[in-house]
Amino acid sequence: MNWSLFFDLTVSGLTLGSLYALIALGYSMVYGILKLLNFAHGDVYMIGAFVGWYTLHALGGPLNPTISGAAVLFVMFIVSMLGCGVLVVAIERFAYRPLRNAPRIAPLISALGVSIFLQNSALLIFGASFRDYDTFDLIGVKTFSVGQLFFSVTQLLTVVVAVLLMVALTIFVARSRLGKAMRSTSFDREAASMMGIDVDRVIAVTFFIGSALAGAAGVMFGLVFGQIYHYMGFIAGLKGFTAAVLGGIGSIPGAMVGGLIVGLAESYATGYLPQGSTFQNLYVFALLIAVILIRPSGLFGTAAIQKV
Amino acid sequence: MRRRASATAALLALGAALAIVAGAYATPERAAAPAAQSGSDAASVKCGKTRTIGFMVPVTGPAASIGIQQQHWAQYYVSTYNKTHKGTKFRLQTEDTQLGAPTGTAEALKGAQALAGSPNVLAVVGPAGSNEIVGVTKTLMDGGLAWVSGSSTRTTLTTDGTRTGYMFRTVPPDAVQSTTVANYISNKLKYKRVYIIDDQETYSTGLADAVQAKLRAAGATVGRDGVSQQQSDFSSLIAKIARDTQIVYIPWQLPPKGQAFGNQMKAAGKGSIKLMGSDGLFDSSFASVGAHVYDTNFPLNPKSKIITGFKKQHGGDGEYFGAPSYAATQVAATAINRACKTGTTTRAKVRAAIRTTAIPAKASLIGVALRFNRNGDLSTLHGFGLYKSNGKDFVPIPG
């Protein structure tokens, strides 16, 4: 057993899985409340990466930041999360809310339309060129090793921030008044409305939180992997969606675990399976299909009782 | 209800998976038999003052970042020509091929149909990708259109005989580039442990295959992998590269991806392993990875007036990947002007004029005269230039 390779792949898989988990949470939360597959979510993640890049450059760029490197990172995350949240609340207001009572295919198509709109708008506004976060210039090539475990500071940052965000979300949903309202709305929207819950507000908050997490994931991606571009949301969105389905769409812990499983599966497939890097998507989606066949509701999903 | 929703989600996911797999791995090898000529081949066209060249290029999609370089260079030729010639002008009719997108070849085909059906289009610059050329061959030939590509390097495109007289290119084929690369690694650097990673596109796999075969024949141990152009996370792949590897060869098409790969190698503590790219990575962003980076490219002269003028207009960026598209546009425009001497022409006459192109070296961007052999390859270009990074830009390796 080549332990060095195993540890490298595990670190890589956990980093990637953390990003997928944050994206998956957005899919799962929105689906949990509206039963809507928000296919524009991957593109929101892309927008988050660009907002982070522009924030970085507004603060002087990676070589000459006007404030400390840690403060730059903090501001990048905050601005990107707020930017994505506000953007998607606006999208929800104009593209999804008018279709809330329409047949379920209508908002799905609207989501696909929003996805293409965001992608092409990004091409128009940001251009086709790749943008580089120049992380090395901002925080240097810092790496750590513990025995055969070898990881970079950006990988550590990604996993830690993702875990903190997921814990914060879990506490928010479980303990806050708004979290309770979100759970009630998810359980029965009409009943929640009759109990005095402002359903529109709850839905808007859900979109905001899910998109803010995607924005944070976008910044993390830029920091760890360097380059961002207008098309990056497509595959990441599909992987995030896969993670959400794998974990049980609608389930918050499921999205987290699903993301980590997809990330690790992708990493181990690349490292150990024949032509793994070429066919990693094949292996990941084969895993999804296998899990869904065995547990149609996903790992953490529960089959709802249908009244007849 | 929930069970049904999950099943629907699973079906959607399965559909998405199939779409990805199909998009990423299918390279439709459309039969490219010479077609019976339609009326458009011999139809007389009034040349007029403004002449139209079709331009097939990835404007959007994953390869848009290299498409923009080709657009800039082709447009640079047209704008320079239009400024300096009072009698005739040129315009480009651009069709987006979306190279690398799941719908890529289908979009290229739509573009080819639009150009073939547009009577004013007299020749085509592009398409960019070898797989696209396979896909559009029949349509362009049915329309009687010649095309000059500035980036498709698959060797068999010109040697299999199916496009003779129609397809031309201003880049040397993979066979030339692969020989240059393999000879340098095995004879000059004398490296025996090599890792090759293609980007799963036709351009890249062809080149990687050829270099791999030549290096193995020379006695080197060659590891091989592939990675999608849509991917930016190379950490798992880098974990597989043994620390005693001497050089990693990445014949990719997107310089920022090469830069990301190089930086991730450094982050993984493997920054001492040499890197070598292909013409697709010939860009300062890839060179900025460090002085341990090599590359190959068309034998451009960075001090030529054409390149200096281009860089001045584009913020100092040479965008060298697109440079052969300048030459391709120059070939098409020159041939159209020759075929239009009487004021009218046909697409057949333009094809014949391209076949007999003779642009002298002093007017050529790529440092040699532009003349084609019978297959449509440049008869004057026999090797690739080798370059090494100085940490910021690539500089030619003497000898």
Image (spheres, grey):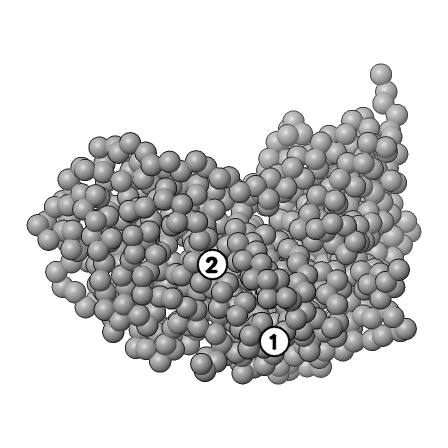
Placement of A267 over or under B266, stated as above or below: above
Q: Which mark is residue B370?
A: none
Write down the chain letter for disc 1. Answer: B
Give percent across and percent down for residue B37.
26, 34
Q: Is residue A95 left or right of residue B302?
A: right
- Camera sees residue A211: no
Q: For this rendering, which residue is in front, A290 or A101?
A: A290
3D distance between C-alphas at marks 1 and 2: 22 Å
Circle 1: residue type: Lys
Circle 2: residue type: Asp
Is the Cβ of the residue at disc 1 closer than 8 Å to that at disc 2? no
Task: Give the number of marks.
Answer: 2
How packed mark 2 is, by other alpha carbons closer than 10 Å (few <14, some 14-19, many 20 or more), is many
- Camera sees residue B388: yes
| Pair 1/2: label in front | 1
Write down the chain letter for disc 2. Answer: B
**Label 2 sits on residue:** B174
Placement of B374 over or under A150, stated as above or below: above
Please tell me which residue is depicted at 81% across the width and 26% down the height of the picture: B1
Give percent across and percent down for residue A53.
61, 67
The answer to whether tags 1 and 2 share a subunit is: yes
Q: Judging from the image, what secondary structure is the residue with disc 2 in?
A: helix
Give percent across and percent down for residue A65.
64, 81
**Label 1 sits on residue:** B190
State the image quarter where residue A64 is shown: bottom right
Please tell me which residue is depicted at 79% across the width and 53% down the height of the picture: A272
Q: Judging from the image, what secondary structure is the residue with disc 1 in?
A: loop
Q: Is residue B10 left or right of residue B28?
A: right
